[in-house]
Amino acid sequence: MKGVVLAGGLGTRLRPLTAVTNKHLLPVYDRPMIYYPIQTLVNAGIIDIMIVTGGNSAGDFLKLLGNGKAFGLKHLNYTYQEGEGGIAEALSLVEHFAAKEPVCVVLGDNIIEGNITVAVRSYRHQGGGAKIILKKVPDPHRFGVPELDGPKVLRIEEKPESPKSEYAVIGIYMYDGDVYDIIRTLEPSGRGELEITDVNNAYIKRDDMSWEELEGWWTDAGTFESLLRASNLVAETGANKIELKHAAEISANV
């Protein structure tokens, strides 16, 4: 399985901070935001990773991350998204990198306390299709919300007025090689973007979607409030800390 971190966009909700840098280069407590999703992948044994970025600060990712030495990696891949075409469009840019292998996609502003090792292992045994990760939240109407029937996902609604569950779809997704064919069928939403919720609902229509509940806390860091919350949570409890071993050793043991 290959890993993808989506770190493009303009970060308009964090202006004026993002007038001078990419959102994902901002600090979350003691590390740049982009460190956390990369660490999430490495902790799950995924060490072949591509960063999708954009805007005027794209070169700063290379200066900061290099080939991933800080994570025990030997190489990091990069690609560039022009403008804001949405999460699904950003994902389409990694088709050549994925080379028909499954991918684990992490949004660059998603921060978790623990790890996704169990979910990744479960998806590998699943043998195809898609998997989403869910978390119970007090305000599901702010997120994509799944309608569930036991282990089955019936549909995902984006920011519904009357949520059909207490769960939010967090920004970690796993897909097989069919995802790029699905993206090619999508039409832009009302905000002119290709939506990841439409990708997920396409897998649901195929009856090819599973889900896993995340243990520990989760937050994004895309607003001033959630950026502060993320920093406080990391300071108080830590987040996806890596053990003192090389990334290749983690991959071999997952």
Image: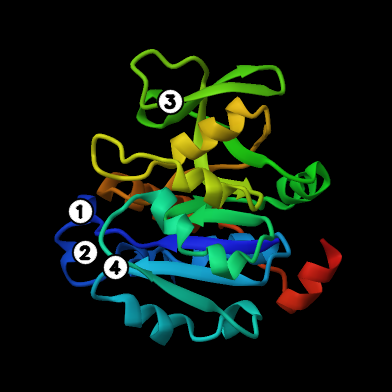
Amino acid type, callout 4: Asn
Q: Is residue 65 visible?
A: yes
Q: Residues within 10 Å of mark 3 (few under 14, many from 20)?
A: many
**Residue marked by disc 4:** 22
Secondary element at tag 4: loop
Cβ atoms at labels 1 and 2 below 8 Å apart: yes
Secondary element at tag 3: helix
For the N terminus, which image quadrant?
A: bottom right
Secondary element at tag 1: helix
Give the Cα distance between marks 3 and 4: 27 Å
Amino acid type, callout 2: Thr
Secondary element at tag 2: helix
Amino acid type, callout 1: Thr
The one nearer the camera, 235 or 91, is 91
**Residue marked by disc 1:** 12
- Return the mark for residue 18: 2
Query: Where is residue 191 shown, x and y percent of the image?
Result: 23, 39
Q: Residue at x 63, y 57 (%)?
A: 103
Mark closer to the chain start, 3 or 4 = 4
Query: Where is residue 58 shown, x and y percent of the image?
Result: 33, 76
Mark closer to the chain start, 3 or 2 = 2
**Residue marked by disc 3:** 140
Give the Cα distance between marks 1 and 4: 10 Å
Q: Residues within 10 Å of mark 4 (few under 14, many from 20)?
A: many
Q: Residue at x 47, y 81 (%)?
A: 65
